[in-house]
Amino acid sequence: MTDMSGAADTAGGSEQPELRPEEETNAGRKRANYSAWTADMLARLGTSKFRAKFVLSDKDRAYARAKGKAVIDRHAHEMLAKRVGPAHPYKDGRQTPWRGHPVFTAQHATATCCRGCIEKWHHIPQGRELTDEEVDRLAALVMAWIERDLVNHPVR
């Protein structure tokens, strides 16, 4: 199993500690319910030349590995709820920076950056607040994308 540090569990190598059970979040437990949907969405998003070009910067990868899954998952939930959760987000279409946090890059890669992209790719209509379940599902997608990027770009 690989954790956000990028290290795989091996029988004799130096292992990175996994998240302790008390660090598991409610959204982390729900993530298993979204695994098939998440895999399908990542495959669909990968067919878009625009979405497929996104990768985390070295700085964002280091930040994600240093903070760990629980913290980045919390950030994803908070950012999605605040920036795209309202029925009419402030500066919709321009509210998500292109860089500066792993979640921002992941939002563009997963089409969770604005309500227009969320409507187009995830079929959640604009003009109403996102439900907690929708935020959980979109955060699970963001986290899956970040985790995949970290696995594809191990620590050198």
Image (cartoon, rainbow, N blue to C red):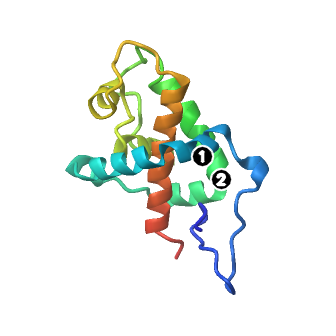
The residue lying toward the viewer, choosing from 104 and 51, is: 51
Q: Which amino acid type is shown beneath numbered disc 1?
A: Ile
**Alpha-carbon span between mark 2 and mark 1:** 7 Å
Q: What residue is at 47 percent from the left and 21 percent from the top?
A: 130
How many badges with numbers are in the image? Answer: 2
Which residue of the protein is positioned furthest toward the bottom in this rendering?
A: 12
| Residue in the picture at 34% in, 17% down | 126
At 69% from the left and 81% from the top, the residue drawn is 14
Q: Which mark is residue 147?
A: none
Q: Sort mark 1 into few (<14), some (14-19) or many (20+) by Cα contacts within 10 Å.
A: many
Residues at discs 2 and 1 in contact (Cβ within 8 Å): yes
Instruction: Find residue 30 and report its image quarter.
Output: top right
Of labels 2 and 1, earlier in sequence is 2
Residue 67 shown left or right of residue 76 in the figure? right
Q: Image check: 4 left or right of 52?
A: right
Amino acid type for the residue under numbered disc 2: Lys
* Relative side of 51 to 143, left or right: left
Residue topped by disc 1: 72
Which residue is disc 2 drawn over?
Answer: 67
Asked whether residue 100 appears in the rendered view, the answer is no
Image quadrant in which you'd find residue 119 = top left
Q: Is residue 78 visible?
A: yes
**Residue 52, percent from left and from top:** 28, 53
